[in-house]
């Protein structure tokens, strides 16, 4: 087959074929389609964590509630970026909003995304409204002007107004939970509905993606909060971290169970593709799936979290391992699913590009991928300049009282 620049930039450059494969078979979805569900999952998990305080009254999570909410906005802004970078002509993406087609899954995603963005922005404004008004009244210059704009003309901080704000925040947080679940469950639905890829074709896929979204979102909040508070040299109350670790351990167990059931389901039904799928999973992807994804990314963190005398370092290490495990899971699903030839008798291997003179190949490489993964943290750093989220919320005494209350509860 003739290899021109167009063919190279759509899979031929980074795909290595083995055994019996079709001439037009390539790994079309590269690293950006791995990062897209990863970032989307982090959004959902971070927002759900914030809602545990605002909706379910988990007071011990108060120190991280604002942080996880603002962090979810930073992640949400970057979530569709991998998709746009993957497109050859991203400027055409506006058409899915200008000429919506409600039978199109990606069009539905756009409206879910915009709805969710509206909820998050509204909730952040109501949560930070008293702080914004105070800054608008006290500060001058460019920052003062920025805070004046952010007040949207509302300067009422009476007890009645603040009480109404609290009610609205609770309503928005409640509405945001199903929106967050739909946002990421939809990503799993997209993969699960692709009938031509046997590894993806399972009704469990939306639930697997949803559970992994929650654990990765909680884990990234643990890691970032500890690192951010340590960097700012603030007192780190261990109570919210301990509570987040409890949530993480519960959802870890559910996520591992779902992934295990999915593999058992494929093995039990033993359809015509099971032979090549089992070779892929248990030989070619064995190290990534069994060692990195399951043992290091799920089983080891679970025991680190549930063993007695949990420490800050153990929580940080366990959450970091979970993030690595979920990223590996995304890689195994996206790249692994495309690694089986449609002939069921061959394999395709993915070699991620590093540098290239061809822009279409370069943008699918490792350098833009690292930039995409770092971008939410840069955004959080900028947001923190306007809406500080790394602050001492609990004093040492309040922290001790909160720990007593937490130790008396199972969840």
Image (cartoon, rainbow, N blue to C red):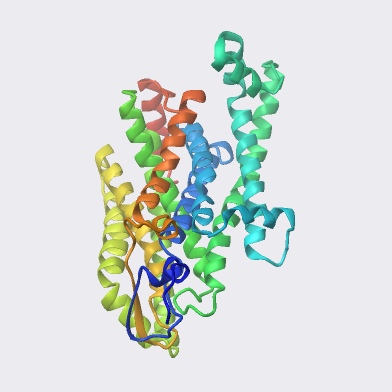
Q: Is residue 402 above or below residue 6?
A: above
Of 75 and 253, the residue lying toward us: 75
Pinpoint residue 239: horizontal percent, then vertical percent: 37, 34
| Quarter of the view holding residue 128 | top right
Q: Which residue appears at 59% of the width and 32% of the height?
A: 124
Number of numbered callouts drawn: 0
| Quarter of the view holding residue 279 | bottom left
Pinpoint residue 322: horizontal percent, then vertical percent: 34, 53
Of 225 and 80, the residue lying toward us: 80
Pinpoint residue 375: horizontal percent, then vertical percent: 43, 42
Q: In this view, does 311 lie above or below 143?
A: below
Q: Which residue appears at 37% of the width and 41% of the height?
A: 222
| Quarter of the view holding residue 290 | bottom left
Q: In this view, does 205 lie above or below 302?
A: below
- Tell me the quadrant of the picture where the N terminus can be found: bottom left
Q: Which residue appears at 53% of the width and 71% of the height?
A: 192
Q: Which residue appears at 73% of the width and 53% of the height?
A: 98
Of 393 and 147, the residue lying toward us: 147
């Amino acid at each position: 087959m003739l290899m021109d620049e167009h063919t190279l930039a759509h899979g031929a450059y980074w795909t290595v074929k083995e055994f019996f494969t079709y001439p037009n078979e390539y790994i079309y979805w590269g690293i950006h389609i791995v990062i897209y569900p990863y970032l989307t999952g982090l959004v959902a998990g971070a927002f759900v964590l914030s809602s545990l305080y605002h909706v379910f009254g988990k007071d011990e999570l108060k120190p991280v509630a604002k942080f996880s909410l603002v962090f979810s906005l930073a992640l949400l802004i970057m979530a569709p970026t991998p998709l746009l970078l993957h497109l050859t002509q991203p400027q055409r993406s506006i058409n899915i909003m200008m000429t919506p087609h409600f039978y199109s899954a990606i069009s539905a995603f756009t409206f879910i995304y915009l709805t969710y963005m509206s909820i998050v922005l509204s909730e952040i404004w109501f949560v930070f409204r008293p702080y914004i008004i105070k800054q608008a009244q006290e500060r001058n210059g460019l920052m003062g002007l920025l805070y004046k704009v952010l007040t949207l003309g509302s300067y009422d901080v009476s007890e009645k107004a603040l009480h109404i704000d609290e009610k609205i925040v609770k309503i928005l947080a409640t509405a945001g939970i199903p929106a967050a679940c739909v946002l990421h469950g939809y990503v799993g639905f997209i993969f699960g509905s692709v009938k031509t890829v046997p590894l993806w074709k399972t009704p469990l896929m939306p639930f697997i993606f949803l559970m992994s979204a929650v654990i990765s979102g909680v884990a990234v909040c643990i890691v970032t909060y500890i690192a951010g508070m340590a960097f700012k040299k603030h007192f780190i109350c261990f109570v919210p971290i301990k509570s987040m670790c409890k949530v993480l351990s519960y959802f870890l167990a559910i996520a591992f169970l779902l992934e295990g059931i999915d593999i058992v389901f494929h093995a039990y039904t033993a359809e015509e593709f099971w032979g090549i799928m089992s070779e892929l999973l248990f030989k070619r992807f064995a190290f990534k799936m069994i060692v990195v994804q399951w043992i290091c990314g799920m089983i080891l963190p679970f025991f680190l979290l549930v063993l007695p005398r949990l420490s800050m370092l153990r929580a940080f290490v366990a959450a970091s391992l979970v993030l690595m495990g979920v990223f590996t899971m995304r890689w195994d699903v996206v790249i692994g699913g495309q690694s089986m030839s449609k002939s069921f008798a061959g394999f395709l291997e993915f070699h991620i590009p590093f540098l290239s003179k061809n822009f279409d190949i370069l943008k699918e490489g490792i350098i833009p991928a690292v930039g995409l993964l770092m971008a939410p943290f840069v955004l959080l750093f900028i947001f923190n300049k306007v809406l500080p989220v790394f602050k001492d919320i609990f004093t040492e005494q309040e922290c001790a009282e909160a720990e007593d209350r937490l130790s008396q509860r199972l969840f």
